[in-house]
Image (cartoon, rainbow, N blue to C red):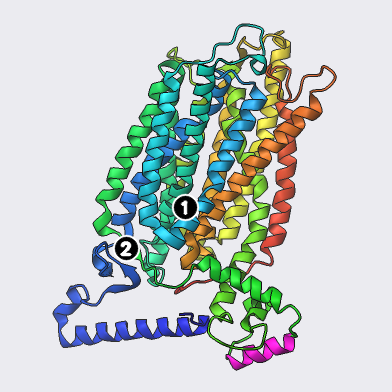
Amino acid sequence: MNYDLLQSDHWLSLNYSKTFIRAISMSISDPSAAQTPLLDDTIDGCLDYKGRPVRRSSSGCWISASFIIVVEIAERFAYYGISSNLITYLTGPLGESTATAAAQVNAWNGAASLLPLLGAFIADSFLGRYRTIILASLVYILGLGLLALSATLGSISISGGQNADDIALSSSLQFQVILFFSSLYLVAFAQGGHKPCVQAFGADQFDTQDPEECKAKSSFFNWWYFGMCVGTLTTLSILNYIQDNLSWVLGFAIPGIVMAVGLVVFLLGTMTYRYSVKGDEESPIVTVGRVFILAVRNRKTSYSAIAAEEEARGILATESSKQFKFLNKALLAPDGSKEQGEVCSIRDVEEAKAVIRLAPIWATSLIYAIAFAQSSTFFTKQGATMDRSTAMGFEIPAASLQSFISLSVVLFIPIYDRVFVPLARALTGEPAGITLLQRIGSGMVISTISLVIAAVVEMRRLKIAEEYGLLDKPNVMVPMSVWWLVPQYALYGLADVFTMVGLQEFFYDQMPNELRSVGLALYLSIFGVGSFLSSFLISAIENLTSGDGRDSWFANNLNRAHLDYFFWLLAVLSAVGLTLYVCCTKYYIYARWGRTF
């Protein structure tokens, strides 16, 4: 059954007024009642694990969120245990070229970030978030197990001087490659179901109708990302060393074990979770789709007829109703009838508008995603050529340099949540300190600065390689400390605190409750499409710059390559993307789904 937005808000106001009056009455008639939880502290729209009305005092909030954050830590440990060092495995045991490996890493990351759209649809329309998380976790563990199995089949050996693309693989080696990539994409498929549902399920543990829980939900996204980076930092610190120096089999098996432990922890919190009620209504995606279909069918309807319908329904003119006004035509049926199911409600139209408002923000965030994709590919290859030894004689694995991104996040998020937000809140009056769009844009600025630094550092590395006569000696270490790369990694982490976390909360917050898994999937799809665009850009530049015997920007000999040109190009694109983003934010109208502030 559909309700108009105004009717829904009116109902919620009456409901909370009644609850408040009951609480006052109880405290007056029985002073001891003020010291005990309300008997009627149930949360509308949520049930417990047995299908009973769930009580606020004994469910949800940080207790439930803690279990969910733990499983996210395990999932990030597993995912980055593969992705962070994947380019090393592809260019090493599988013998691929740098450009080919980078393109394949980006393609896999792109698939892993786009598949959440499918996972979110299944969760929101059929299985629910809790069941989807369990099923996806089981598939995840299976994929990781098969990945470890593929590594036991041996590595592809390449004789010196031969090109990997020209080697005829034996049937057994071909089977190894097929099993490896099949397992790899099985993990991507599982991550597609796991990622949007876990985060949305965690945010569901906070009631947006309660002012305190609503503020806690904003902090949840900060600490959620903090937990993600703890998992990432752990895998980069430990697992990359195991993969590079001990065994790839062990390096792929450990993530599977950690993922299994994470699933057990998630199941332990079952009795504390709040489960959103899923009624018999049709899929919210279908409902939103109907708005667009009816609006197109009614494209010839005059706006005067729409204005008359709005007046008849008592709809007040607002900025939201004036924006994308063509969708208001869905309020009328094509034949003029008003039979149930033939027309859309005001809430249906507002939900459709909320989705379409996200499109410009989604599109202008793609450049940030392209830049983000380089931290696990060319940044890693860049560090592999530099002096990575420490005072204790230990050599840092190149992929472990990504730990500085996570370390930056882990150090800054507590400062952001406990220092920056309260100070900014006092100045701006915003519950989160600054608006979500301001937070996202701030990270884009920092990301652009990071790319400029990366380009300058690469120019310095190439100059030192030339001074020492190493241009044609790619296997000789360039006498330049790898610590020169720390600033660009650290700034990437700082940019993530603003943009990555901001995008997560924005795409969750600005979607209707029934579509919040889809909202988080849309956020993830930014990085999926960004990875594919990065792959396409790398392939295009490789073809354009490698002709006539020239070394391309991504030559296997990085001393003859020009990663600095690529980083400068990305910095310019980032500046253009930031400009377009700022223009789009000026016309954005925030949706307030059930908020009390």
Q: Position of residue 92 (x, y in %)?
A: 55, 18
Q: Position of residue 461 (x, y in %)?
A: 67, 20
Q: Is residue 503 visible?
A: no
- Residue shown at 42%/50% (left/top)? 224
- Amino acid, disc 2: Arg
Q: What is the distance, in whole Å, between disc 1 and disc 2 at their CAs?
A: 17 Å
- Residue shown at 36%/81% (left/top)? 16
**Circle 2 — which element?**
loop
Residue closest to the far front: 171
Residue closest to the far right: 548
Residue under pointer 2: 274
Establish if 230 lies above or below 100: below
Magenta stretch secondary structure, dominant: helix
Establish if 218 lies above or below 495: below
- Point out the stretch of residues depicted in magenta: 303-313
Q: Is residue 547 magenta?
A: no
Residue closest to the far top: 160
Residue 196 circle label:
1
Q: Quadrant of residue 145?
A: top left
- Residue shown at 60%/93% (left/top)? 312
Q: How many marks?
A: 2
- The answer to which of 436 and 85 lies nearer the viewer is 85
